[in-house]
């Protein structure tokens, strides 16, 4: 499978066309951004770690019956995925209060919810990814009511599968962001990535942060945290 022209360069990944119109290659970068691109940096080795972690989780989720875009790992930083039309929603699931939830509602981080929450943000950098509810997304024709139902069902199923997995390796899954896309026939599948860039992961014993908050909040030890996550998941 060869990389043809670059279709898109985002903050953390590049997307390339391939000779198959239904497939593309995603290439994970070491670039890190936070606060909608205002803070920029590099996390050495991040691209390779996020590629391997995402591919691992996409396979695990497929086994649990959740359809994903994953096709094949090409090398350290690149994977072949099914090309989708991205639904422009960031789908955020939370098990524990943190980040923008704690700020918005004026509560401390670390409140364990009895049930997970779901929220949507409109994926639009110019508007700073504003929070929106399902009715807004439907009104703006970003997704149909049926698609929203499917997305919610898959997002909660992803949470159950990942929570259980992370627990087994001594990590608490606090929150995470998912993106979904449509195949040419309209089928909704899970796309994008699942990594310490897009999830909050706390060591179950010590509470130590093992995710991008180390970069966002200048906590130091960023590379080591990503390596530790890879070690917990893949034993290396
Ligand atoms: P951003 O666009 O937020 O800066 P990235 O750097 O991660 O994010 O760029 C990757 C882009 O590829 C994102 O816009 C994401 O929505 C998109 N994408 C992810 N998976 C697929 C896929 N299977 N097909 C097409 N586009 C995808
Ligand atoms: N997240 C993400 N991309 C975004 C916004 C959030 O991957 O553009 C992830 C983030 O890493 C965290 C979860 O979604 O795991 C919830 O993020 P939150 O709303 O608390 O926002 P933040 O604190 O990142 O501003």
Image (cartoon, rainbow, N blue to C red):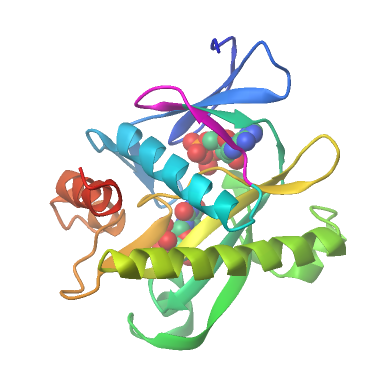
The residue shown at (64%, 64%) is: 120
Find residue 29 and report its horizontal and vertical position in percent: 37, 30
In which quadrant of the rendered view does residue 102 lie? bottom left
Q: Quadrant of the N terminus?
A: top right
Residue 21 placement, left or right of 169: right
Magenta residue span = 68-78
- Seen from the viewer's position, the closer of residues 204 and 199 is 204
Residue 206 placement, left or right of 30: left
The residue shown at (61%, 24%) is: 24
Vertical position of residue 60 compared to residue 200: above or below = above
Find residue 171 and report its horizontal and vertical position in percent: 29, 67
Q: Is residue 204 something one can see in this rendering? A: yes
- Seen from the viewer's position, the closer of residues 73 and 49 is 73
Q: How many numbered markers are drawn? A: 0
* Residue closest to the far bottom: 114
Q: Examine the structure image and report whether residue 177 is included in the region drawn in magenta.
A: no
Q: Quadrant of ligand 2?
A: bottom left
In which quadrant of the rendered view does residue 112 lie? bottom left
Q: Is residue 37 something one can see in this rendering? A: no
């Amino acid at each position: 499978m060869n990389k043809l022209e670059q279709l898109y360069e985002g903050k953390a990944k590049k997307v390339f066309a391939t000779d198959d119109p239904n497939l593309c290659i995603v290439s994970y970068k070491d670039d890190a951004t936070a606060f909608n691109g205002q803070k920029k940096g590099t996390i050495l080795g991040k691209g390779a770690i996020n590629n391997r972690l995402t591919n691992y989780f996409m396979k695990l989720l497929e086994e649990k019956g959740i359809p994903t875009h994953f096709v094949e790992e090409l090398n350290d930083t690149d994977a072949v995925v099914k090309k989708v039309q991205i639904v422009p929603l960031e789908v955020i699931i939370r098990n524990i209060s943190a980040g923008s939830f704690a700020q918005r509602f004026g509560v401390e981080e670390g409140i364990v919810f009895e049930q997970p929450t779901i929220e949507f943000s409109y994926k639009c950098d110019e508007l700073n990814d504003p929070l929106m509810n399902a009715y807004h997304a439907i009104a703006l024709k970003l997704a149909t009511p049926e698609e929203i139902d499917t997305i919610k069902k898959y997002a909660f199923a992803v949470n159950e599968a990942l929570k259980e997995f992370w627990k087994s390796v001594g990590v608490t899954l606090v929150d995470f962001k998912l993106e979904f896309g449509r195949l040419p026939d309209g089928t909704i599948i899970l796309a994008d990535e699942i990594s310490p860039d897009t999830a909050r992961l706390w060591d179950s014993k010590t509470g130590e942060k093992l995710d991008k908050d180390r970069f966002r909040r200048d906590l130091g030890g960023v590379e080591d945290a990503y390596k530790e996550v890879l070690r917990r998941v893949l034993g290396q």
